[in-house]
Image (spheres, rainbow, N blue to C red):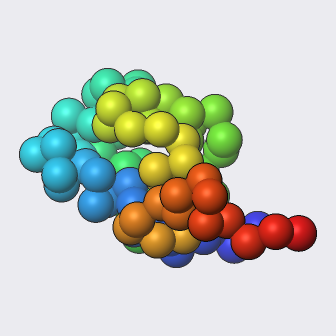
């Protein structure tokens, strides 16, 4: 399974916004800095359970890590199916 590059980008973006080093974020979710680096570079798949823990540690929603753009779409602006 290929890693979605948007997710890897958002993990790094939120980590930097929170002024966290990879070692600190890793410690918060029970991982090493090398694993956080591998996640941010898209070198390995990220299990969904770890995505949830990363979101909690970064104080964001899971959607913040997997969203397509920097700005969420307002509820009234979503295209109809």
How many marks the image carries: the answer is 0
The answer to whether 14 appears left or right of 29 in the picture is left
Q: Is residue 75 above or below residue 49?
A: below
**Occupied quadrant, residue 12:** bottom left
Q: Position of residue 10 (x, y in %)?
A: 39, 61
Q: Is residue 12 above or below residue 61?
A: below
Q: Position of residue 39 (x, y in %)?
A: 46, 58
Residue at x 46% of width, y 50% of height: 64
Q: Is residue 29 above or below residue 67?
A: above
The answer to whether 3 appears left or right of 40 in the picture is right
Residue at x 38% of width, y 55% of height: 11
Q: Quadrant of the N terminus?
A: bottom right
Q: Quadrant of the C terminus?
A: bottom right
Residue found at the very far front of the displayed protein? 76
The answer to whether 5 appears left or right of 19 in the picture is right
**Occupied quadrant, residue 76:** bottom right
Foreground: 79 or 28?
A: 79
Q: Is residue 53 above or below residue 80?
A: above
Would residue 44 be seen by someone viewing this image from the given angle? Answer: no
Would residue 63 be seen by someone viewing this image from the given angle? Answer: yes
Residue found at the very far right of the displayed protein? 81
Q: Position of residue 3 (x, y in %)?
A: 62, 68
Q: Position of residue 62 (x, y in %)?
A: 54, 42
The answer to whether 40 appears left or right of 33 in the picture is right
Residue at x 64% of width, y 33% of height: 49
């Amino acid at each position: 399974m290929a890693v979605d590059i948007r997710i890897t980008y958002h993990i790094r973006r939120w980590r930097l916004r929170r002024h966290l080093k990879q070692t600190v974020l890793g410690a918060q979710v029970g991982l090493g800095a090398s694993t956080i680096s591998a996640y941010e570079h898209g070198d390995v798949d990220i299990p969904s359970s770890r995505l949830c823990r990363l979101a909690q540690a970064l104080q964001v929603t899971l959607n913040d890590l997997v969203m397509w753009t920097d700005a969420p779409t307002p509820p009234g602006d979503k295209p109809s199916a």
